[in-house]
Image: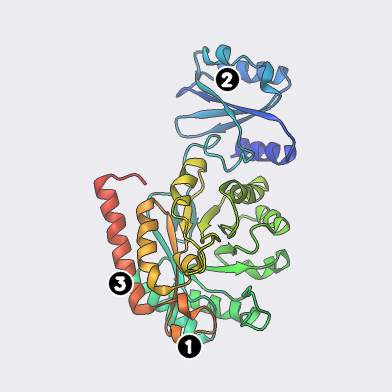
Amino acid sequence: MQKEKAGRAVWAEIGCRKVHQMIIILKNNPDPEQIEDLTGWLRDLGLTVCPTVGVGQTILGLVGDTSRVDMDLIAALDIVEDVKRVQEPFKNVNRKFHPENTVVSVGQASFGDGSLTLIAGPCAVENEEQILSAAQAVKEAGAQILRAGAFRSRTSPYSFQGLKVEGMRLLMKAREASGLPVMTEILDASQLPLFEEVDLIEVGSGNVRNYHLLTALGKIRKPVLLRRGPSMTYEEWLMSAEYILAGGNSQVILCESGIRTFETYTKNTFDITSIPVLKSLTHLPVAADPCQASGKYSLVPGLASAACAAGADGLVIEVHPDPQHALCEGERQLVTGKFTALARRLFALQETKGNCGTVC
């Protein structure tokens, strides 16, 4: 743990400086004295060595001018499995530096361990009856985390902005009544004191480039769900996650929420490709939100199933007891009965994947 924290500190310190990077993958159970000799020699060359120790594998990350390093010479050493140069600017989130999946735990739920976690609940907390009813319904359907917005970030200043502090109080009451951990969205770093009891902090697509907020979230030890911005590339998205990890908080879940394209039939275009791509680029768990991506409840079951089949670690589904009278985004929220059927379908699909050994 101390070695990983030291490595993050180094990556944070170098920031955006243009440097060469290299990783040295060691063989299983390398000789400690040989590792010490190798790292000492590399430091004598003026390089910073950041070790990452995993189960059965150790990786040495090198930062600095590696042009003087003879890759063939290092590859020939008894303890070395492989040597690679790294081009990506993100380090802490990079799977090359951290080959094993990071597992993020929220209450009894886990992301990244091969299971499927459902985060469900209304778009916003509207009143006590609504949130308590929704919490009980999604729990009975199999959801492991309750979601609802107390603070709402809306395009129009005249739209419902959430119940704010009162919404937070009702959300905590729903957590106590249902026993489910809760996720809700933060809009500004100044709100962090209000989120001390929140189990999973959501960063919406409008704040994914709020680097002041991301830096602040890196200093806490609480799980964060980081949505993709509608105009973000994979690298830009991962660099936003890098801000959080650089501060020392590795409990980050990435959430695909759709991107803006020329198509206007749906709110956004659901980028199903992002799930397997991110699985190859990063060790962080990946979730998806078909409700926000499509903006239409009728499309949610199919998109949710596709995300599950593609390997998503979790799904965010908006569920409301009475969507037709919802104060915001009613057109994309499932009624509780339809969510129950969808949850049953998704868990069956996940079990089928496990039984056939499919790797997505």
Q: Amino acid at mark 3?
A: Ala
State the CA–CA distance, disc 1 to disc 2: 64 Å
Q: Nearer the viewer, residue 219 or 341?
A: 341
Q: Is 86 placed left or right of 14 in the picture?
A: left
Q: With 144 as the anchor, is 210 left or right in this view?
A: right
Q: Amino acid at mark 2?
A: Ile
Q: Nearer the viewer, mark 2 or mark 3?
A: 3
Percent x, y of residue 17: 75, 36
Residue at the (63%, 58%) spot, across then down? 208
Residue drawn at x 39%, y 62% is 303
Picture coordinates of residue 119 (x, y %)?
Answer: 45, 66
Decide: is 336 above or below 46. below
Asked whether residue 145 is in view, the answer is no
Q: Residue extending furthest front?
A: 262
Which residue bears the numbered disc 2? 35
Answer with mark 3 or mark 1, whichever residue precedes in sequence: 1
The percent coordinates of residue 147 (x first, y second) are 50, 70
Q: How many marks?
A: 3
Residue 129 appears in the figure: yes
Query: 10 Å neighbourhood of mark 1: few (<14), some, or many (≥20)?
Result: few
Label drawn at residue 341: 3
Residue type highlighted by circle 1: His
**Residue depicted at x 45% and y 51%:** 275
Helix, strand or loop at mark 2: helix
Nearer the viewer's eye, disc 3 or disc 1?
Answer: 1
- Mark 1 or 2 closer to N-term? 2
**Residue at image location 50% in from the left, 84% down from the top:** 326
Question: Which residue is under mark 1?
Answer: 325
Camera-side residue: 182 or 15? 15
Q: Nearer the viewer, mark 1 or mark 2?
A: 1
- Count neighbours of disc 2 (C-alpha within 10 A) and say few if under 14, some if 14 to 19, many if 20 or more: some
Q: Nearer the viewer, residue 295 or 280?
A: 295
